[in-house]
Image (cartoon, grey):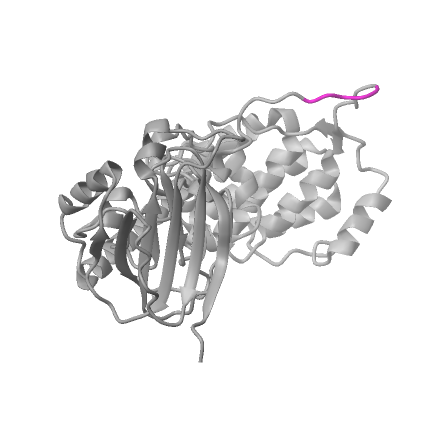
Amino acid sequence: MGVMVRRPVEGEVHVHYGQIYVESDPDSYGPDLAEAFAGQNSGLCGAAVPGGLWLTTGLHTGNVGFTVEVHDQAPPLDESWEDVVEVSFRPVSGRSRLMQWAGEASWALGLGETDYRVRYCAKGMDEAGEEDTRLDGEPQLDCYLLQFWPAPPAPDQVLKQTAQVAAYWHDYARRQPPPPTPAERAEAELQARLAREAAEREREQAYERWAWGGQSPSRALKDVGGNVRGLLDFDAALVHAIDAAGPAVQRAVALLAARRACEAAGLAELDWVAAGLTALVGERPLPPPFDDWDRMWQALGSDPRVPDRTVGRAVPPERPPFQPPADDAEPTAQILGPASLMVNQSKPVPTYARGTGRGMAVTIGAPDRPLRMSQPHMALPALVAAAEADPLRAALDAVFAAVVTYGERHRTVLQEVWSVCEGRSETPR
């Protein structure tokens, strides 16, 4: 049976910073220089980090000749190559690729998840290093051959050394400390994962505190539902004060908010609305039509005594945008290898902090008149909300409905609610 050779790459490839790589971990951006050659005797093909190879070239930037061969057994060494090293390599997935700097291009190698011996051969490294850069149309300066064949793991070797560039990198590799053991690597990965999880928890907690007005919410506030989020925009401190006040004060706040909303809308003196407020005071079930939403709106629409009152939209005060913890940021697109240190990368704005800067709105045609809302329609939900079984939910929803009912004057009703929470005011009967 003849020797089987496959050439997934043949021709020229582009290198930058004198680097090109083999990657098999789709979630990795490759090791840094010291990691790749840690504990090695040879400095041209770094294999110290599982699943990846760091390949050094003489040319800094430009196209080099490059061939990749996959053999079924060890090929003979061609003595025409000037510098030759061997390392061991095992892909961590079935997706091994030859990868240019920064992932600008790649070539599938079709390697299995098994142990390989790798031979990296070079020619013309010193000439290319002196020239530094090869422009389009200029003659080829250096070329390389990367060979794979199945073989058990073995120490890396320098089989042939000629170029001063190769000697420099061999010396660099020999000065690197040994790589971490599998146990040490696993521990480092565990600690890194725990640190990421802790940072994410810190970010989530910081965002929660920001969303709830600067302090973490109680379990009751988290679970209350209703219009708590809407009221937070208007007065987050009041939301926490209502939560801390206890059921008796919460009922008093709900009653106050319902009464003030109905008074502001001109409904408090209507007999069927007054009956609902009286039921709230006596902590009795709401009478008809408040026991059915459809009947309530029908009653409102059919009563000729309901005043035609409108109010402008209640606008919450502005607050500073979320500022994530100092070390919190989105992952950035990474550059392979140490070349990342040579590139000035600006960090993007985290997604949860975007859209909080100043902007400009352009209106085409005549601007809309300020939105006006029917106060009676805003007020009745306050009365219904105040009868909620959960006193916290009743207070929060009734106050929010009162805020909407008051519109531009919503600070008036919020100040009264504060007085009740702080014990400075009695609830009107």
| Near-viewer residue (197 or 399) | 197
Examine the structure image and report whether residue 359 is included in the region drawn in magenta: no
Vertical placement of 243 versus 141: above or below?
below
Judge from the rendering whether residue 179 lies leftward or rightward of residue 25; answer left or right.
left
Where in the figure is residue 423, as x and y percent of width and height? Answer: 39, 35
Using the rendered view, name the quadrant where residue 402 is placed.
top right
> Which residue is depicted at the point 28% across and 52% down?
84
Quadrant of the rendering where the C terminus is positioned: top right
User: Could you tell me what secondary structure mostly forms the magenta stretch?
Assistant: loop
| Near-viewer residue (131 or 253) | 131
**Is residue 48 visible in this depiction of the protein?**
yes
Where in the figure is residue 412, as x and y percent of width and height? Answer: 56, 26
Where in the figure is residue 154, as x and y percent of width and height? Answer: 21, 65
Vertical placement of 159 versus 325: above or below?
below
Judge from the rendering whether residue 219 lies leftward or rightward of residue 161; answer left or right.
right
Where in the figure is residue 371, as x and y percent of width and height? Answer: 75, 28
| Near-viewer residue (109 or 92) | 109
Q: Which residues are magenta?
A: 361-365
Q: Residue furthest bottom?
A: 1
